Amino acid sequence: MLKLLFLSTPVGSLGSGQGGGVELTVQNLAQELKQKGHLLEVVAPLGSTLKGIQVKTIEGNCQIAVQTQTRDVPTCLPANSVLANMWEYARQVQNNYDLIVNFAFDWLPFYLTPFFDRPIAHFISMGSMTEANDEIMNRVAQNYPDTIGVYTKSQAASFPFAEFCQILGSGIDLSLYDFCPQPQNYLTWLGRIAPEKALEDAVEASNITGIPLKIFGKIQDQDYWQQIRQDFPQAPIEYGGFLNTQELQKQLGKSLGLLMTPRWLEAFGNVAIEALACGVPVIAYARGGPAEIVRDGETGFLVKPDSVAGLVEAINKINQIDRFCCRQQAETEYSLQALGERFEAWFQRILRR
Ligand code: HBI
């Protein structure tokens, strides 16, 4: 049994959605590790909530989201920084714990690592973003090998310390997703409707094949969405809105396949494992996280990046995929239990040093 202190992302309170994918990771991990008998406390900004887990909330001003910054941005902390306050609390209580786990993608926790008496595991939740972060993360990777965790190999590859990264993958609560053996005649596309997600390629493929495409997710860039509608006036597409998991998995499960067309380096791509959990094959550009999730020819198809012709070719053979294999892959690789085991093994490796 380990005594673990989790320090959450300082960009917003847990449950606000501000922290995106890493909120889900903190929530799932905390629940799973508590389930396995470990003792843990989560430190997070005021207003944070976590089902069934003790949260120590800390007041202060949130960090600026790093993805809104440029690569050369100087490290900055606001007055009364919640990040600094969280780490002051951690310094005071560190001796009650075996291991501290950092989920912030920020300079300070990495800089503070050598000042702490207790070991610190750092989970990095995006690819390389700024020079200052790369530099301080690299310093920790060199001095404390094993202590850097990431979702995927391609995410690790974006950092100068790629070979030091522990690849931990992700996981979802499979009990929320129902296997659907018999699809209806439509494809799905899920995600933020924004240029880096290249929805236009999926729409073009639907236009060529004549197979209807149902689109779900937040319209983040309205002009971009209108441009797609103008460019493909005849495409058989339908926008289904931004749904909660329960509603989304109902619609997703009935589809022939999920199209993933990322233009940028997707660190992981949770929508891929949500599809697999419903038995839905994934057709994805062979780049980033999805390229490490989809088993080409078994649970979907990996397509030459940015090739609409490649998408069309894959769509035309989607019935070759056994939908049950998709569900099985989700169960073996992406269950919460598998995720908890991977993190537990990582923590043990650090503590053995
Ligand atoms: N920005 N500064 C900062 N710190 C974070 O921890 C952070 C962020 N932007 C996005 C983010 N975390 C998470 O939404 C992603 O890691 C998933």
Image: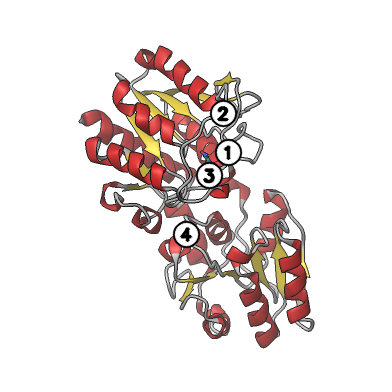
Q: Is residue 185 above or below residue 143?
A: below
Q: Secondary structure at mark 4?
A: helix
| Residue beneath the point at 38% across and 13% down | 96
| Residue beneath the point at 79% across and 81% down | 233
Q: Nearer the viewer, mark 2 or mark 4?
A: 2
Cβ of mark 1 under 8 Å from ligand 1: the answer is yes
- Amino acid under disc 3: Val
Q: Quadrant of residue 226?
A: bottom right
| Marks 2/4: CA–CA distance | 47 Å
Total residue callouts: 4
- Amino acid under disc 2: Pro
Q: Which mark is residue 328?
A: 4
Nearer the N terminus, badge 3 or badge 4? 3
> Which residue is label 1 attached to?
64
Q: Secondary structure at mark 2?
A: loop
Label 1 Cα crowd, 10 Å radius (few <14 / some 14-19 / many 20+): some
**Position of residue 111 in the picture relative to residue 43 (left or right):** left
Q: Is residue 329 above or below residue 33?
A: below
Nearer the N terminus, badge 2 or badge 3? 3
> Which residue is label 3 attached to?
66
Q: Is residue 37 visible?
A: yes
Nearer the N terminus, badge 2 or badge 4? 2
Q: Quadrant of the C terminus?
A: top left
Q: Quadrant of the N terminus?
A: top left
Cβ of mark 3 under 8 Å from ligand 1: the answer is yes
Q: Which mark is residue 2?
A: none
Foreground residue, 132 or 54? 132
